[in-house]
Image (cartoon, helix red, strand yellow):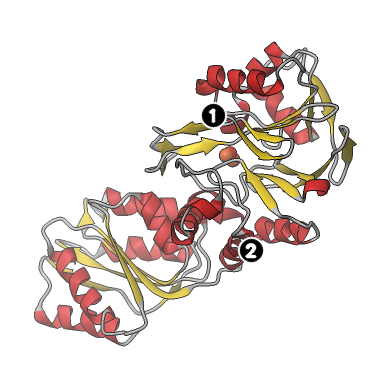
Amino acid sequence: MIKNITQNVYLVGIKDWNVRDFHGYETQNGSTYNSYIIKDKKNALIDSVKYLFKDEFLKNILDTLGATTLDYIVCNHAEPDHSSALSYVIEKYPNAILLCNQKCKDTLSLYFDTTNWKFQIVKDGESLNIGDNTLYFYDTPMVHWPESMVTYLPKQKLLFSMDILGQHYASSYTFDYEESLDTLLYEARKYYANIVMPYSRQVLNTLEKLKKLEIEIVANSHGLILKKYINEMLSLYSDFANGKNKEKAVIIYDSMWQSTDKMARSLIDGLMTNKDLEIKVCNLKTTHNTIVATEAIDAKYIFVGSPTLNSNILPTVASALTYLEGLKPLNKIAFAFGSYGWAPINVKKITEYFERMNFSILKEPVSCKFKPTKEVLSSLYEIGKNL
Ligand code: FEO
């Protein structure tokens, strides 16, 4: 679907209503691959889409350009959700000049046979006039890949922000003001937690760069375009990148024969006596790692429970912890618990994850043989209560 978002900027991207897995991220509400055309003396396409949608995408481009042609293609990011339809666009418009930085060119050359592509390398801060508008290019390394950059139109105070400030969220809406702020911020939190969280330092560098720009529209590559809630979204990024946590506890666990489950329940009962504490329970039998990361990102306390299984922890718990470890959550206080049959290897293994993630340890772990006694349950209740 084509949508005119400013006088001469058109949204020509794709709503992917059905995608449910984005390299491990469970996208329950689908996603969008936003791409834009600036119609000017020279026409420019900003980014492309996932190759699966090339036909609809090419039709959108053709319908938008009409009798005119495509002069420039900006590639802000080489990840295939934005680049894998590029070769089809270039096949259709072989004279279009592809604007990107050197790292992006190098990456694209590994994905495609770019022998006949017409590249023009743009450096950080460089600009290009296309008529009434001038495009400015700013590198934003590691947000989300080394070659990532954004493109800015000062005349329209419009930022093509690529992955930054996006959401994996397909809806019938186009702009943020059409959606509730709660939904927008939840989807943005989920996106940041599962995509951007490992790059806190680089996010802070990017925020510093963006501060110098006057921005009234964020035309991102995923989700709703921002007009009304730009400050709220920037503030969310700043809080996450600075490791600012809420008074919130997340209990992440799985159980074999209900012993670790009983332990979790006592702990939760104790936690619930803390009036101002937000509590989220992630039972891994029913909770995807995507949600674990989404709840963990702004939580001060992380509680992890697993029984010992075959001298290790349950695979569900190992999976959640491995996923979290890769995402590098900041400033957490953690506690391990769980039952065992022969040896309390479970809490040792969980603690090793905590140590690798530089979590502070709240208390010595609590483990019990086979079934928790009243005393064990009571001690967990007290740990929760006296947080
Ligand atoms: Fe939306 Fe990093 O790609």
Quarter of the picture containing the N terminus is top right
Residue 312 visible in image:
yes
Q: Look at the numbered discs 1 and 2 and tell me whether their residues touch, using CB distance below 8 Å.
A: no
Around disc 1, counting alpha carbons within 10 Å, would you say few (fewer than 14), some (14 to 19), or many (20 or more)? Answer: few
Residue type at the position of mark 1: Met
State the count of labels: 2
- For mark 2, give the secondary structure: helix
Residue denoted by label 1: 1
Disc number placed over residue 231 in the picture, else none: 2
Give the residue at x 51% y 54%. Answer: 188
Residue at 10% in and 77% down: 373
In the image, taking residue 73 as reference, residue 364 lies left or right, namely left
**Relative to 189, does residue 249 appear above or below in the rendering?**
below
Q: Position of residue 59 (x, y in %)?
A: 59, 18
* Label 1 C-beta lies within 8 Å of the nearest ligand 1 atom: no
At mark 1, the secondary structure is: loop
Q: Residue furthest front?
A: 7
* Looking at the image, residue 103 lies above or below residue 164: above
Please, what is the three-letter code of the amino acid marked with disc 2?
A: Asn
